C-alpha cells in the first residue's frame, strides 16, 4: 500500500458494522487525500463528507465530517460547522473532535471488517525541489499532458510540518491530492494548480487530531516550489492565508 500511494494511487476503503436501525451495513468511501509518513505509515483522509446516518438520511446540522483512515490503525473524526453555529456536541468553541479510536466508545458502531483498494494508474511526469529545481522533466510536460485532456495530481513533501509545535521534530511525510483547475503560465514559465479541498494535520504516528491543530481548505501548488494555503482555523473559525515552499511530485492520468 505504501508503494502504491507513493506512486499516486487513489484509495477507497470499506468497513462492515451492525447499525441499530438498518442491521448489517457495509460502507465504502473514497479518500480524497492520501499520505505516507516516515516511508512506512499510510492512509487517507475523507475531506468532502457531510455526516449522515448510514445513507438513511441527513439528520445533523450542516457540517463537514472530516475522517482520518490509517492502514493498521482505527479511524478518527472531527466535525466542522458550515451554518455559522457551533456543533451541538462541540468539544471546543465551534468544532467537535472525537480522537478516540472508533469502536472503543459505547455509542460507537463497532466495525467488523475493513477492506482497502488502490487504483494505481497515475504517471509521474514532473518533480522538483522546494526551490523549483526539476529532477524529472519540467513544467512543459504537465502542460502537454493537460492539453491532451489529462487530470493532475500532486504529492507534496512535508506539507503539514508547520503544525508541529516549536522545538519538536516533524515526521517526514508526503501528502497526495488531485487538482481541480490547472494554469500554464506561458510567459513566466511555470505551471500552477488548485487542489481539491483537504485538511492539514500535525504529522504523527498514529495520525490523529491533536486538539484543534488542524486546518481545512484549499492549496495552490506551483512548479517553482511555492505552495499557498487558504485554510479555516477551527478554533477561531477565521480564514488564514500563507505561502511555504515544498518539493512536489506531479502525476497525470
Image (cartoon, rainbow, N blue to C red):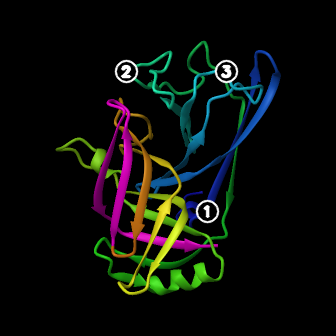
**Does residue 239 belong to the magenta stretch?**
yes
Does residue 236 lie above or below 127 as drawn? Answer: above
Of label 2 and label 3, which has the lower sequence position?
A: 3
Numbered tag placed on residue 92 in the rendering: 2
Give neighbour class at mark 3: few <14, some 14-19, many 20+ (Cα, 10 Å).
Answer: few
**Magenta part of the protein: which range?**
225-253
Of label 1 and label 3, which has the lower sequence position?
A: 1
Quarter assignment of residue 168: top left
Q: Is residue 61 left or right of residue 162?
A: right
Does residue 90 lie above or below 72 as drawn? Answer: above
Q: Nearer the viewer, residue 128 or 191?
A: 191
**Does residue 134 belong to the magenta stretch?**
no
Question: Residue at left 57%, top 65%?
Answer: 8
Determine whether the residue tagged by mark 2 lies in a helix, strand or loop: loop
Is residue 158 among what the camera can see? no
Numbered tag placed on residue 59 in the rendering: 3
Q: Nearer the viewer, mark 1 or mark 2?
A: 2
Q: How many marks?
A: 3
Give neighbour class at mark 2: few <14, some 14-19, many 20+ (Cα, 10 Å).
Answer: some
Determine whether the residue tagged by mark 3 lies in a helix, strand or loop: loop
Q: Nearer the viewer, residue 111 or 252?
A: 252
User: Spatial distance from mark 1 to mark 2, Cα to Cα?
Assistant: 35 Å
Question: Residue at left 55%, top 72%?
Answer: 251
Query: For mark 1, what is the residue?
Result: 9
- Where the C terminus falls, by quadrant? bottom right
Q: Are marks 1 and 2 in contact (CB under 8 Å)?
A: no
Amino acid at each position: 500500500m505504501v508503494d502504491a500511494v507513493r506512486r499516486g494511487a487513489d484509495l477507497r476503503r470499506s468497513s462492515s458494522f451492525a447499525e441499530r436501525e438498518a442491521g448489517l451495513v457495509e460502507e465504502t468511501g473514497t479518500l480524497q487525500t492520501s499520505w505516507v509518513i516516515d516511508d512506512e505509515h499510510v492512509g487517507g483522509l475523507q475531506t468532502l463528507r457531510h455526516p449522515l446516518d448510514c445513507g438513511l438520511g441527513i439528520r445533523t446540522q450542516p457540517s463537514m465530517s472530516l475522517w482520518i483512515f490509517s492502514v493498521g490503525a482505527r479511524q478518527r473524526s472531527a466535525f466542522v460547522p458550515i451554518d455559522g453555529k457551533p456543533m451541538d456536541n462541540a468539544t471546543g468553541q465551534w468544532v467537535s473532535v472525537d480522537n478516540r479510536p472508533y469502536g472503543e466508545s459505547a455509542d460507537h458502531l463497532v466495525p467488523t471488517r475493513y477492506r482497502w483498494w488502490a487504483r494505481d494508474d497515475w504517471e509521474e511526469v514532473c518533480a522538483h525541489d522546494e526551490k523549483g529545481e526539476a529532477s524529472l522533466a519540467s513544467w512543459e510536460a504537465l502542460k502537454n499532458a493537460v492539453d491532451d485532456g489529462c487530470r493532475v495530481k500532486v504529492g507534496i513533501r512535508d506539507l503539514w510540518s508547520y503544525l508541529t509545535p516549536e522545538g519538536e521534530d516533524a515526521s517526514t511525510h508526503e501528502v497526495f491530492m488531485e487538482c481541480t483547475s490547472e494554469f500554464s503560465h506561458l510567459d513566466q514559465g511555470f505551471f500552477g494548480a488548485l487542489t481539491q479541498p483537504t485538511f492539514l494535520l500535525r504529522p504523527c504516528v498514529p495520525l490523529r487530531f491533536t486538539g484543534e491543530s488542524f486546518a481545512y481548505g484549499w492549496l495552490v501548488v506551483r512548479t517553482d516550489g511555492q505552495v499557498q494555503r487558504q485554510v479555516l482555523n477551527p478554533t477561531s473559525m477565521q480564514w488564514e492565508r500563507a505561502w511555504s515552499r515544498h518539493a512536489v511530485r506531479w502525476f497525470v492520468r
